[in-house]
Amino acid sequence: MLGALGMARRTTFYIDPKGTVVFIDSSVSTGTHGTDVVKKLVELGVSAAQRPIEAGP
């Protein structure tokens, strides 16, 4: 997605196992995104066993 100045803007979509979008985060900060995602997953009631494991670079 592009912001007002034509720069890329990051958005994270949280999708439940049924395929329903349960939250859209359009204020992503790359410096805190990992922590922000974990906090949101906890807030949404996703247990650690359900959280996906991200691959490295």
Image (cartoon, helix red, strand yellow):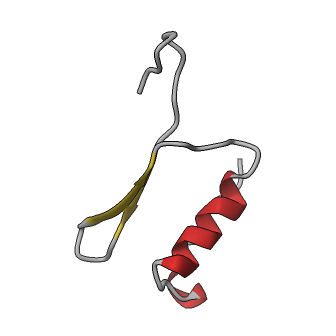
Residue extending furthest right?
Answer: 31
Q: Quadrant of residue 13?
A: bottom left
**Whether residue 48 is situated above or below residue 14 in the rendered picture:** below
Residue 22 lies, with reference to residue 47, above or below; the image says above
- Residue shown at 53%/74% (left/top)? 41
Q: Position of residue 32 (x, y in %)?
A: 73, 52
Q: Position of residue 42 (x, y in %)?
A: 57, 80
Q: Residue at x 66, y 42 (%)?
A: 29
Number of marks: 0
Please identify the quadrant where the N terminus is shown.
Answer: top left
Q: Is residue 23 left or right of residue 31?
A: left
Residue 53 visible? The answer is no
Name which residue lies at 76% across and 45% down.
31
Front-most of 48 and 42?
Answer: 42
Is 3 rendered above or below residue 9?
Answer: above
Residue 23 seen in render: yes
Relative to the observer, which residue lies in front, 15 or 23?
23
Which of 57/20 is in front?
A: 20
Q: Measured from the top left, where is residue 18 in percent x and y? A: 23, 75
